[in-house]
Image: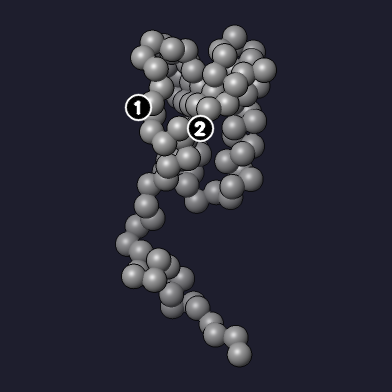
Amino acid sequence: MAKVKYISSPNEIPAGQKYVLVMYGEEYAQTTHPLGLTITVARTVSQLSFLTAVHTAKGIAKHAGVSEVFVCTATTPAPNPTPSGMLPSEASETTTIS
């Protein structure tokens, strides 16, 4: 089984090493390249969906003879958060429970 290594940036992948990379992005995509495969998961999905993509990547790596799966958990910030950290649409839908 392929070894999973968590990284904070794709730049941490050693040059010339074959790999499968799982990372957050705008939407789900699979991109092949000379050194392997990148699976991009929409940053809006649940953590369970992201972990499912990691599990899938491990299977792909095993089948392809790739020894390492890199998982980049750094996310791109959500657009225009309010000072409280909520998106404007969430802030307007907030209810107070007494």
Residue 40 x %, y %:
47, 34
How many residues crowd around disc 1 within 10 Å: few (fewer than 14), some, or many (20 or more)?
A: few
Q: Which amino acid does label 1 sit on?
A: Asn
Q: Which comes before the other along the chain, label 1 or label 2?
A: 2
Q: Name the residue under label 2.
A: 6
Residue 19 x %, y %:
49, 18
Q: In which quarter of the image is residue 78?
A: bottom left
Q: Give the colour scheme shown.
A: one colour
Q: Residue at x 43, y 75 (%)?
A: 91
Placement of 19 over or under 83, stated as above or below: above
| Mark sitting on residue 46 | none
Q: Which residue is outermost to the bottom?
A: 98
Residue 53 x %, y %:
59, 34
How many residues crowd around disc 2 within 10 Å: few (fewer than 14), some, or many (20 or more)?
A: some
- Mark 1: secondary structure: helix
Q: Between residues 10 and 35, which one lies in front from this camera angle?
A: 10
Q: Between residues 4 and 97, which one lies in front from this camera angle?
A: 4
| Mark sitting on residue 11 | 1
Q: Which amino acid does label 2 sit on?
A: Tyr
Q: In which quarter of the image is the C terminus?
A: bottom right
Cα separation between marks 1 and 2: 12 Å
Q: Residue at x 56, y 13 (%)?
A: 66
User: Would you say residue 60 is visible in this rendering?
Assistant: no
Residue 81 x %, y %:
36, 64
Placement of 5 over or under 87, stated as above or below: above
Asked if residue 66 lies left or right of residue 72, the reply is right
Q: In which quarter of the image is residue 49?
A: top right
- Mark 2: secondary structure: strand
User: Would you say residue 13 is visible in this rendering?
Assistant: yes
Placement of 45 over or under 6, stated as above or below: below
Q: Quadrant of the N terminus?
A: top right
Q: Which residue is drawn at 59% across and 32% down?
A: 54
